[in-house]
Amino acid sequence: MEQWLLVSIIIAGYLLLTLTIGLMAGRRSSDSVAGFVAADRSFGLLVMYFVTGASVFSAFAFLGGPGWAYSRGAAAFYILAYGALGMAPFYWMGPRAASLGRKHGFVTQAQLVVGRFPSNGLSSLIALVSLVAFVPYITLQMRGAGIVIEAVTDGHVPLWLGAAVAYGIVIAYVLSAGAMAVGWTNTFQGIFMVVIAWALGLYLPFRLYGGVRPMFERIATERPDLLTLPGLTATGDPWTWGAYSSLIIVSAVGLMMWPHLFMKAFTAKDDETLRRTVILFPTFQLFLIPIFLIGFSGVLFAGQPPAPDFILPFMILETGLPAIVVGLFCAGALSASMSTGDALLHASASVVVQDGVTKYLDLDDRAQRRLMRGIVLITGGIAYYFALDPDSSLVQLLASAYGIISQLAPPVVAAMYWKRATTTGAISGLVAGTATAFFFFLNPELKLLDLHEGVLGLMVHIPTLVAVSLLTPEQDEGHLRGFFS
Amino acid sequence: MSLKTARALTIAYLALMTISVTWPGLLPFARIEPLILGLPFSMAWIAGWVAGSVVVLYLLDRVERRHRQEGDH
């Protein structure tokens, strides 16, 4: 049998298994909004751990990570640095958000913010900001899935078909089972990804260079510029410390503000589970080490992939691995794409309906659930449309998505911790911060010290939030007591 | 250890880590040699801070948990 055919069969088997797990999980979930969005608040430690890890490690980490290590060298280390920093504050914030969620029935972070700062406009603004950040992120995942399938099947399954099949499956189980399916498929996919990453990350350096140390010794001699921080830009010039450092800061601030991650506070079974997840999270982070090793193994390898993001499939195909390994790798990369993509699609629908539409329309539980399913389809369709555009510069869009999503941090933190904050302050800050980030996204040449536009946005956002809050009358004491106690 | 001390130490670790993995705290450690476990020094340095955060958060959790249990009575 031809190799690509065998590989396709392995992938098909894997996709079928994912679909089965997703659909089986749905049978355990109640047919309500709380069931669809928050899985009836029932996730235990194992599921929570892998849900969080697998949703953070997307196609960007699995394909972009090696791609960055390969083409931009030490610049990729930023990905290793920000995760633990971004997650740690959630040890306190998570349980606090969870207890407010249980008390007031919140299932999204906008509900939490608006519970403190009552304003339909603010709610819609948060929904809009989330959605704008979500679409490029979902697009990236779909394109990642398509790229992998096209590369390993030798072009027999083109990008449009690969992306459509992989995401057809994702949409099928998100539609049928909601949060419960996302939880169980991510557990399965998370385990799978970790095993594949370590196996390949150690195999390639040993096979090609006789070990990890000999590999880095050779790169240090032949390409020292690549291993010198802050690494290189996409065009191969030295990168700036301002851009490197501010990307770590904005990613750390933005990480837990992604609705699909923040909402885990509302899906966890209890506070203990949440805290354990936070403690164990950096162990997932260390899984980037083999990911980088895969990319570095391609540096001195003869031949070049069509684009840096293709380095992983390229290395696998070029080193003549057996079909079964190629198939399993492909499944691992698909896991990375699908396990983030499903969480993103699911969260985007939850956010748009809960925080946008229901503020203006009175819908019953069943109508809401039906509308959420419609939005999963629409968002998926829009992202798919962009995924097929070969010119879409996704990495830039993703970096900007982080700039936008990090603007949710000040209002969320103020809602939970700063009693003097006011609704006007929260709205002014969010508008000013988002506008600033957007301005510098459009005019990158004006950026101060090459800082990330999200950090520049926060530098305007936080003072605005504080100043306007102090200038406007304090919130009603009764309202504060009702919210906090 | 009191809850306050544990929280202060954890926050201090995270602040120190933030400085150590970005400019300018990273500058003295932004080098290739010596290789640690085969990895470039800067990569091992950052990975070390990440691994350390697991230990710090675990120790924080022990103090927090003891405090919560005492609070129950």
Image (spheres, grey):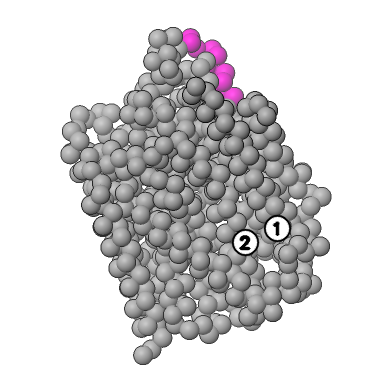
Magenta residue span: A463-474
Confirm whether residue A14 shows in the render.
Answer: yes
Q: Residue A472 lies in magenta, yes or no?
A: yes
In this rendering, position of residue A290 left or right of residue A124: right
Which quadrant of the figure contains the C terminus of chain A?
top left
Look at 42% across and 13% down and name the residue there: A481
Q: Are marks 1 and 2 on the same chain?
A: no
Which quadrant of the figure contains the N terminus of chain A?
bottom left
Confirm whether residue A248 shows in the render.
Answer: no
Question: Residue reaching furthest front?
Answer: B73
- Residue B71: give x, y in percent of width and height: 52, 23
Name above or below for residue A78 compared with residue A471: below
Look at 31% across and 60% down and name the residue there: A21
Marker disc for residue A199: none
Assign the magenta stretch its main secondary structure: helix
Chain for mark 2? A
Chain for mark 1? B
Look at 77% across and 44% down and name the residue there: B25
Q: Secondary structure at mark 1?
A: helix
Report the front residue among A447 and A312: A312
Q: Mark 1 sits on what residue?
A: B43
Name above or below for residue A292 compared with residue A275: below
Local crowd size for mark 2, using a 10 Å CA cut-off: few (<14), some (14–19), many (≥20): many
Say what amino acid the circle numbered 1 marks.
Answer: Met
- Residue A300: give x, y in percent of width and height: 68, 76
Q: Mark 2 sits on what residue?
A: A289
Name above or below for residue A353 compared with residue A114: below
Q: Residue A231 lies in magenta, yes or no?
A: no
Q: Secondary structure at mark 2?
A: helix
